[in-house]
Image (cartoon, rainbow, N blue to C red):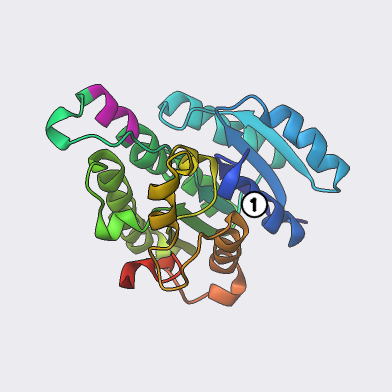
Amino acid sequence: MPKVALVTGGSSGIGLATVRRLAADGMEIVIADVNEKGHNLVEQLHKDGIKASFQHCDVSVEEAVKQTVEEVKKQYGQLHVLINNAGVGNREIKLTDLPVLEWQKVIDINLTGVFLGMKYAIPLIEESGGGAIVNVSSLLGFKGKKLMSAYNASKAGVITLTKNAALEYGKHNIRVNAVAPGVIDTPIVDGWKEQEQKWEVLSRANALRRVGTPTEVANAIRFLVSEEASYITGTTLMVDGGGLTY
């Protein structure tokens, strides 16, 4: 029987690349996304031979996440892989000027969303005999970037939350890791692309001197959920082209 993977934010960018990568390994995929275009995406994936379903889910809303996992259990009876990928950025603004509501929105989606995903998926993964979780953090969770306080804090929180979950659930045969992408060509950086000079600097601010692709991050995620990473848990894999060293 194929393994089942739940991918939040799976309708675009890193999430969609991960959906395709895990499906290539024979997994059945559940895409959870706030974007309703996921329905049309699933139809296209079916044409491509990928077994996938869609659940509308706002990861910042506890009841929505709970219902999504309940639906996974109802449809598939099991869950082996969770990819907490859904996330948002924040506009560049000084910490003292950042409205609390904007701060809270970023934290709710990027950090609380990861917490809720694990809170409700882990029991089903345990019932299924164990599995693997990958949380998507960021290079900025390590080194920070001025004017990005909410995003930086949320992604740093994901790194430590990942370690805690790994410590608590390793004995249940559940591995929990994170990836920390650098600048990746996804919709979240579209605003930066519009500022040509700034984009040129950002896109070359790493050892490889280029922007990464969603597929390159998906490959790292695929590795972490595979048996090739069977003795890896509680760690964060940098997928940043050497951005942390730059």
The image quadrant where one finds the C terminus is: bottom left
Q: Is residue 158 magenta?
A: no
Lateral position of residue 46 relative to residue 224, left or right: right
Q: Please tell me which residue is depicted at 58% across the width and 45% down the height of the picture.
A: 13
Q: Percent position (x, y) of residue 79? A: 61, 49
Image position of 140 (left or right of 24): left
Which residue is depicted at the point 33% across and 63% down? 167
Q: Kindly report the secondary structure that dominates the magenta region of the rendered protein.
A: helix
Residue at 41%, 30% (x, y): give it.
60
Residue type indicated by callout 1 = Ala
Q: In the image, is 161 to the left or to the right of 137?
A: left
Can residue 140 be seen at all in this image of the molecule? Answer: yes
Task: Inspect this view and state whether residue 235 appears.
Answer: no
Say which element carries label 1. helix
Q: Position of residue 77 (x, y in %)?
A: 67, 42
Q: Nearer the viewer, residue 64 or 156?
A: 156
The magenta-colored residue range is: 101-106
Residue 156, percent across and down?
A: 28, 52
Graded by Cα atoms within 10 Å as few (under 14), some (14 to 19) or many (20 or more), the crowding at tag 1 reads many
